[in-house]
Amino acid sequence: YITPQYYKFPGFLSPSLGVKFSDVPNGLAAFSKVPALGWVQIIFFAGIVEGSFGFNDYKSGTPGEYGWKVLTSSDPAEKTKKLKAELANGRLAMMAIIGMFFQDGLTGS
């Protein structure tokens, strides 16, 4: 929502259809401008990335264990507090983006 206001890639999104990156609007209206094959490519690429990196860790590893710790503390109460704060921040971020989607869908801006 913010980056396309200030920067758009030069060139064509779809050369065969003549769609330039500058033709793609911000927000939910962008969904209708990207060709169907473009969405297939995006989903395929995401699937390749998800399937190629860490898939064995997904089946046999510990959830959330990436080899480094961000939210750590030797005090269990402090660690629980940090984890709850992180969960609350994630939920707040989800509500914020849903609010932005709702505003964009309702007003178009």
Image: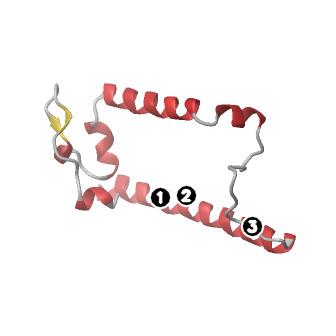
Question: Label 1 sits on what residue type?
Answer: Ile
Note whether 13 is above or below 102 in the view shown. above
* Structural crowding at the residue carrying mark 1, measured as other residues with C-alpha within 10 Å and reported as few (<14), some (14–19) or many (≥20): few
- Classify mark 3: helix, strand or loop: loop
- Classify mark 2: helix, strand or loop: helix
C-alpha separation, residue under disc 2 versus residue under disc 3: 24 Å
Q: How is the image coloured?
A: secondary structure
Q: Nearer the viewer, residue 103 or 25?
A: 25
Answer with mark 2 or mark 3, whichever residue precedes in sequence. Answer: 3
* Residue at 39% over, 59% down: 103
* Residue at 77% over, 72% down: 81
Q: Position of residue 75 (x, y in %)?
A: 85, 73
Residue corresponding to mark 1: 97
Q: CB atoms at circles 1 and 2 under 8 Å apart?
A: yes
Answer with mark 3 or mark 1, whichever residue precedes in sequence. Answer: 3
Q: Quadrant of the C terminus?
A: bottom left
Question: Label 3 sits on what residue type?
Answer: Thr
Residue corresponding to mark 3: 72
Q: Position of residue 28 (x, y in %)?
A: 34, 48
Quarter of the rendering containing residue 73: bottom right
**Left-right relation of 78 to 86:** right
* Structural crowding at the residue carrying mark 2, measured as other residues with C-alpha within 10 Å and reported as few (<14), some (14–19) or many (≥20): few
As drawn, the residue found furthest toward the front would be 67
* Structural crowding at the residue carrying mark 3, measured as other residues with C-alpha within 10 Å and reported as few (<14), some (14–19) or many (≥20): few
C-alpha separation, residue under disc 1 versus residue under disc 2: 5 Å
Nearer the viewer's eye, disc 3 or disc 1?
A: 3
Q: CB atoms at circles 3 and 1 under 8 Å apart?
A: no
Residue corresponding to mark 2: 94
